[in-house]
Amino acid sequence: MKISVAIPTFNSSKYLTPNLNNLIKTNLISEIVIRDDCSNHKDIELADKIIKSFKKKTTIDIRYFQNKENLGAFENKLKVIKDCRQEYVYQLDSDNIPMNNLNNYLNRFIKYSKDPSLLYLPSKIFQFRK
């Protein structure tokens, strides 16, 4: 099973390199989706440069989107999750560097989470019911 990683950003491109370095080491990730919430021009340029560099280093699909207007943290998180293509999404805040044993952690999460209505956030699991 493969998963998507959703990373909402806002003026936080300085964290992309350590985030992507750890994420590309994980064999469960098929895509990394990054959505910027109207960062300043300098930050967008740096993010674009970093992402282009990492696309050359990995076969993981890395996609980068920019909002036309600032949506705020919650709406940007929701939008980047919706951009993901896989059934399972690991939502990673841009300033939270993934742990070194991320592959083991994700394997455990997938093994014990049989319900696709689960949404993982860095500190909690929320279950949404209709």
Image: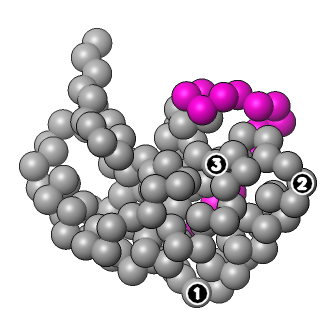
Disc number lying in front (3 or 1): 3
Inspect this view and state whether residue 86 appears. Answer: no
- Which x, y percent locates residue 45? 84, 64
> Amino acid under label 2?
His
Instruction: Tell me: 88 left or right of 50.
Output: left
User: Disc 1 marks which residue?
Assistant: 57
Mark 1 packing: few (<14 Cα in 10 Å), some, or many (20+)?
few
Marks 3,1: beta carbons within 8 A: no
Q: Which mark is residue 41?
A: 2
| Residue range corresponding to the magenta coloring | 62-75
Q: Is residue 85 magenta?
A: no
Q: Amino acid at mark 1?
A: Lys
Q: Secondary structure at mark 3?
A: strand
Residue at (70% x, 74% y) in the render: 50
Q: CA distance from mark 3 to mark 1?
A: 21 Å
Answer with left or right where residue 79 lies relative to residue 60. Answer: right
Q: Disc 2 or 3, which lies upstream in sequence?
A: 3
